[in-house]
Amino acid sequence: MNPARAVLGWQQAIGAGQVRTTTAELLRAGTATFATQAAVVAVLAPTSPAQVAACLRIAHAERVPIHPVSRGLNWGLGSRAPAVAGAVLDLSGLDQIVDVDEPRATVTVEPGVTFAQLDAFLTGRQSQLFLPTIGGSGQASIVGNAVERGHGIGPNPRRADAVAAIEAVLADGSEVRTGFAGATTFSGAAAHRHGVGPSLAGLFLQGRLAVVTRMTLHLERRPEALTLFGGRIGDGPALAGVLELLRPMLLDGSLGRSLFTVWNRYKYAACRQSYPWEAMRGEVPLDLAAVGTQPDWLFTGALYAPSVAHARVARHALANLTGVVASFRILEPEDPEFHRAAPKFLGTPGPDNLRSMYWRKPRGMPDSPEPERDRCGVLQLCPLLPMGGDALPAIQDIESLALAHGFEPQIGFDCTDPRTIEAFVTLSFDRDVPGEDERALTCHDAILNSLDQAGFPPYRLGVQSAGWQRKDSDRQQILIDRIRTVLDPHGVVV
Ligand SMILES: Cc1cc2nc3c(=O)[nH]c(=O)nc-3n(C[C@H](O)[C@H](O)[C@H](O)COP(=O)(O)OP(=O)(O)OC[C@H]3O[C@@H](n4cnc5c(N)ncnc54)[C@H](O)[C@@H]3O)c2cc1C
């Protein structure tokens, strides 16, 4: 690896102003919401796919690893920081909304396009379409979120299911396209995910095999009748009952296009308030009684119906829950709460959940949150669980391990797949407290390993678990390694 020669090459190829090497820039790029080790040698800011290709060609020749980030707001999973020493490829300068196909409900974007940007664009042209936003920042990247197979707040929340054609640059600088991108003349072909023959799109999602420079995604249509609902489920066994009840409803499609989200009380509390240091007399973890509540489960969601008549049918199915949950409420459009809550279910990002990153910070969340700068501690885990009551032992394991290590287990998940749950678990802490970084990482690893051993592997990994080894299928790993050897023999894309 020759970083000095690579820096010279990058300066010549894309201009010295787009190759940042000041100590402040490098430190900022290498700082996450937890302790990181890898040094950043340069931040490269290309503004076109051709410049991306030039950066990669040089990295390939000089054997310098490159970590692509689209917006770098991968909070709890690494932010912009790489897993190994190398350059950060900042793609925020490629920020064009290339195309919106209103009749076929697709959008093609570059990596720098944010959720807020697309939402403003679609709203501005009075589009009937929206892209489910995230609970994280509206300034996060749509492509970054999709590449990591994130989740949106809307029907079909699993982002990877919305991904169609991809354009990417390989480690040697060559460009590739998946599906039918660029291969046909008719509008809509780019919406076809697979193309003909082996489907390649999957290689570039969590692949670390190429840099994605353009992506087409399916959009959602705004519903004629939006129904919002929420309530309290109750304790763990009550949660198991709800999951069992929901599974056949999801298989049957009784709720139509819908979103059903479950949070535990710790997540709910962290999104709404700061840690009650006074009531807890400075002790951790939180005793929920100190905030006047108990460890229970809550739900919120939406029904996206094409007519009032369809909504009535879905609401009737939803009413099955009333017998098993502790409380149940439908928000009617005339309720002011409906108007406060509705935008986030229709693609408009909001700041509500960001507060959870500042949960343990004594001064709470500032007006312009920047968790890396503010020394927020956030670690996320993403375990795959079964959809049903048999998820409960794993959930209880997460809760007891987190609490035993002194952290609140903030757990959330969507119930939209009748077979599996992709859960998200957040540990929030204060990096300014001595020893907290180490304690939080120990807790994170204990949960990751315990779940993995019990048969609940992660479906998404952050930089903090880059060394995690899959145990489920050696053969799958061997094939991935063989593909990597061909596409990126020097391991440049990381
Ligand atoms: C409070 C809170 C709420 C959150 N809510 C959600 C949520 O609702 N849904 C959700 O999914 N996540 C959520 N997250 C996690 C995270 O913030 C989001 O996933 C966010 O979208 C990631 O940041 P980004 O989009 O800027 O991606 P980036 O940081 O730009 O990219 C993420 C990773 O993807 C890879 N990558 C990025 N761009 C490219 C590219 N062009 N080519 C190849 N590889 C690339 C890199 O490995 C990179 O590190 C939340 C986090 C917090 C703390």
Image (cartoon, grey):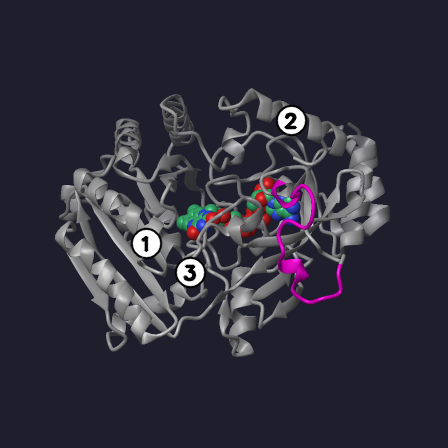
Residues at marks 2 and 3, CA–CA distance in whole angstroms: 47 Å
Where is residue 292? Give x, y as percent.
13, 48
Q: Residues within 10 Å of mark 1 (few under 14, many from 20)?
A: many
Q: Is residue 475 visible?
A: yes
User: Label 2: which residue?
Assistant: 479
User: Label 1: which residue?
Assistant: 260
Which range is magenta?
Answer: 184-202
Q: Residue at x 59, y 43 (%)?
A: 205
Position of 315 with respect to 418 (left or right) is left
Question: Dividing the image into 4 quarters, which one contains the N terminus?
Answer: top right
Q: Amino acid at mark 2?
A: Leu
Tell me: residue 293, above or below residue 104: above
Q: Amino acid at mark 3?
A: Asp
Residues at marks 1 and 2, CA–CA distance in whole angstroms: 36 Å
Residues at marks 3 and 1, CA–CA distance in whole angstroms: 30 Å
The numbered disc on residue 493 is none
Q: Quadrant of residue 236?
A: top left
Q: Which secondary structure class fits the magenta region best? A: loop
Contact (CB < 8 A) between labels 1 and 2? no
Q: Residue at x 19, y 60 (%)?
A: 319
User: Label 3: which residue?
Assistant: 367
Q: Is residue 73 visible?
A: no
Mark 3: secondary structure: loop
